[in-house]
Image (tube, grey):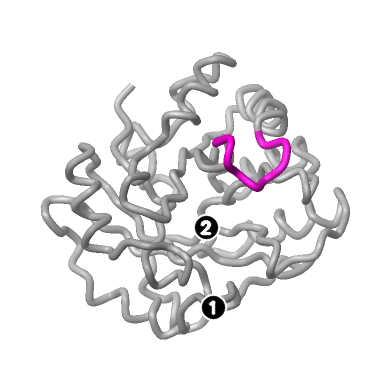
Amino acid sequence: MRLIMDLHTHTTASGHAYSTLTENIMAAKKNGLKILGVSDHAPMMPGSTHSFHFGNLRIIPEYVEGIRVLKGVELNILNEAGEVDLGGKDVETLDYGIASIHVPCFSDLGRDGNTLATINTMKNPLVKIIGHPDDGRFPLDYEKLVKAAKEHHVLLEVNNSSLKPTSYRENAADNYKIMLKLCAEYGVSIIFGSDAHFTSDIGNFEKAMAFCEEIGFPKELIVNTSEEKLMSFLK
């Protein structure tokens, strides 16, 4: 299975990542990717960049070094209403948004509250991906989540970083087993994300791929293999 894209990547603009966009693009080229998405953290993440940064992503060419560069953002889910920390003119030219729960920006609302917050975020037209829906510190009702992803035509991410032994997210593997079983049952597509904060992780899906192979997850539901599949979600 050839994976040609990585949409969850960070640059120095995120404040706690350590590579430039150019360095990430060159790593994507070296690793045989066709599409790279830049998705730096939105402004409420401590240390991240100003909202102007995202509006100005329009100056980046569509192709750099033969790599298609998609302009995105990793939004912070803020509350049960599904509000996020970037909007208006700053997102008008973006290709996609990843919406994620992060410790500095969200307080645990319990299983029902966390699920409602995530599902309400899916109603935002910018949100195309729910990032790392795997952290046991913020429990989710996965059946409701998967059904909502299908209804709103939003991708659920399998985050490679979450499956590393060094990850601070709790019980990711166990939670992915539940989520992916339901995705297979309801025919809901997923996307692998490296969550790269340094060039060496660009296009690194080793843990995510091995996990999906181990549980027999249907390859046809993994969008990283096809630009056409991806664009059906981004259009």
Picture disc at residue 98: 2
> In the picture shown, does residue 94 fall above or below 165?
below
Q: Position of residue 214 (x, y in %)?
A: 55, 15
In the visual, does 42 lie left or right of 80?
left
Magenta residues, start to end: 164-172
Give the crowd class for mark 1: few <14, some 14-19, many >=20 residues within 10 Å: many
Q: Amino acid at mark 1?
A: Pro
Picture disc at residue 43: 1
Looking at the rendered structure, the number of numbered marks drawn on it comes to: 2
Q: Position of residue 113 (x, y in %)?
A: 85, 57
Along the line of sight, the residue nearer the viewer: 56 or 167? 167
Q: Where is residue 5, by image quadrant?
A: top left
Single out the residue that lies furthest toward the front: 166
The residue drawn where x is 38% and y is 80% is 53
Quarter holding the N terminus is top left
In the visual, does 206 lie left or right of 149?
left
The residue drawn where x is 53% and y is 22% is 212
Label 1 – label 2 distance at C-alpha: 14 Å
Residue 124 forms part of the magenta stretch: no
Picture disc at residue 210: none
Q: Label 2's element? A: strand
Q: Position of residue 102 (x, y in %)?
A: 66, 61
Query: Can see residue 86?
Result: no
In the visual, does 6 lie left or right of 186?
left
Q: Give the mark toward the camera: 1 or 2.
A: 1
> In the picture shown, does residue 130 fall above or below 11?
above
